[in-house]
Image (cartoon, rainbow, N blue to C red):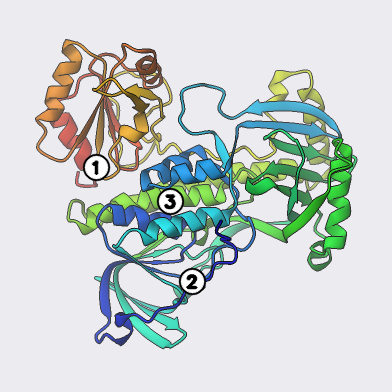
Amino acid sequence: MIDYQSLRFDYRRHADQDAAPPAHHPVVIVGAGPVGLTLAIDLALRQVPVVLLDNDNTLSSGSRAICFAKRSLEVFDRLGCGDRMVDKGVSWSVGKVFFHDEQVYRFDLLPEPGHERPAFINLQQYYVEGYLVERAAALPLIDLRWNNKVTGIEQRDDGAVLTVETPEGNYQLSAGYVAACDGSRSNLRQLLGQEAKGRTFRDRFLIADITMDAPLPTERRFWFDPSFHPGQSVLLHKQADGMWRVDFQLGWDADPVEERKPENITPRVRALLDSIGFADVQFQIGWASVYTFACQRMERFRHGRVLFAGDSAHGVSPFGARGANSGVQDADNLAWKLAAVLKGDAPDALLDSYASEREYAADENIRHSTRATDFITPKSEVSRLFRDAVLELTKRHAFARTLVNSGRLSVPAVLRDSPLNTVDADAFKGAMVPGAAAADAPTVRADGSTGWLLRECHGQQFTALVFGAGEAAERSAEVLKAFDAPLHIVRVQGTTPEGELATQRYDAQPGTVYLLRPDQHVCARWRQPTPANIRAAIDRALARA
């Protein structure tokens, strides 16, 4: 078995280092973390060559981001590495909330049937990065360069010139577009004189990865003010390889250096295990870190030919698993748009919609994250009294459970106001509004075999879902088949239990058509489309309108 934490990747000299004038590439991505790797793979699958630069030669140290949401897994499926992640990770959907030592609330993040992927998997970040690196290595259009650090950038009308530092000296590289995926301390952000603004939280938290053999159920446990860690909060999660993530709130006055020492972590973990009936379980401490955090973002995610994604653009608290997941969604949003612009299918203005859509999503994530943090770590006596009263009420009253916020977990933003959406002309119910990420459901293929709806969608083209059978459905299908541009058509039959579930989720009737962007967000829908409808909707979704 590969030890992804100890992997070291070789620096290799590239012919570009001797090029004069600087070698030109359509896209250069800076940062080979989960976001940069996702973007590189997505672009390569769309036949766009990519240079991916990383200032280091290792994967992440410690488990770091561990909660990968259903939407991220669906993106990884499209990239060809979702199965590995789900097989290795720990799938879960149930969470339990405790006040003092009593369970007051239980929730299920995926209570309905008919989804291929779980609500979440817990998988150490180094596995996710390792699997993405291996997928990238299998794609010849990705040129991944380790120990290549960007130290300068000069923007021009037609691109940017990067200065890159290597163990053998500096060289320059020309790029049509630059994607800054270089993390919360983004060097590119600093080089452009930009900053992320927002709210910094005056609190400290200890993360510890512990390995133990405890027969605990696979679920998320969150304690408010437990007897084993009074006045603070604690979170417990299971990961792969028999590893558990424990997160202890420490308070602002805690000494980060002292709290990371094994002799100070051990009694905290021991007290937790004793309190839940595992006094005899032995454990080992792996990686540990003490952190603070801020909820903040850049004012704009696009600066000329440079587009910011992931932690370089925005940061949130860890409560709700919005960091890595929102970064993967950034990459998912940006890749198809960059590809469309570079291939001449869309104007450069389409990239402005990347910025506006993902800025909106960042605001939503920051709002949820801030609310969760304020609930978990009240900063006044009034706030604490309110929180404790809510927790007491949850035991008996359902309404109070909606007020409990131990980190409302990541879901994709619904881009309702996107300029790429076509406004409904027909009446629809349900959640699949223009701007929503398409919901998965079981489906039956033309040959009678069963599958999953999102797997049937085309990752590089617009997809049209045609629902039902009969005359109305055939009319819609004929309109789509006659369309004179690349369009992937999926027939969704409603005559089977599988098809009925998809029909319900999309509030479909025979002949209903949903148009999905290449990133599987709904951009238009009709009860009975016309060729002019389809043309106008695709033009709008490509910023050609």
Element type at mark 3: helix
Residue position for label 1: 461
The earlier-in-sequence mark between 1 and 2 is 2
Label 3 to label 2: alpha-carbon separation: 26 Å
Residue 473, position in %: x, y? Answer: 20, 16
Up-down relation of residue 264 to residue 149 (above or below): above
Q: Residue at x 41, y 29 (%)?
A: 440
Up-down relation of residue 504 to residue 199 (above or below): above
Image quarter (top left, top right, bottom left or bottom right) of the N terminus: bottom right
Residue position for label 2: 9
Q: Looking at this view, is 193 or 507 the one in front?
A: 507
Label 1 to label 2: alpha-carbon separation: 34 Å
From the viewer's perspective, is 327 left or right of 20? right
**Would residue 526 be seen by someone viewing this image from the given angle?**
yes
Q: Looking at this view, is 23 or 367 the one in front?
A: 23
Residue 118, position in %: x, y? Answer: 53, 33
Q: Residue at x 42, y 54 (%)?
A: 38
Q: Residue at x 37, y 48 (%)?
A: 79
Image quarter (top left, top right, bottom left or bottom right) of the C terminus: top left
The earlier-in-sequence mark between 3 and 2 is 2
Residue 485, position in %: x, y? Answer: 13, 40
Instruction: Check disc 2 and give the amino acid type.
Output: Phe
Residue position for label 3: 330
From the viewer's perspective, is 481 left or right of 298? left
Looking at the rendered image, the disc whose residue lies closer to the viewer, 3 or 1, is 1
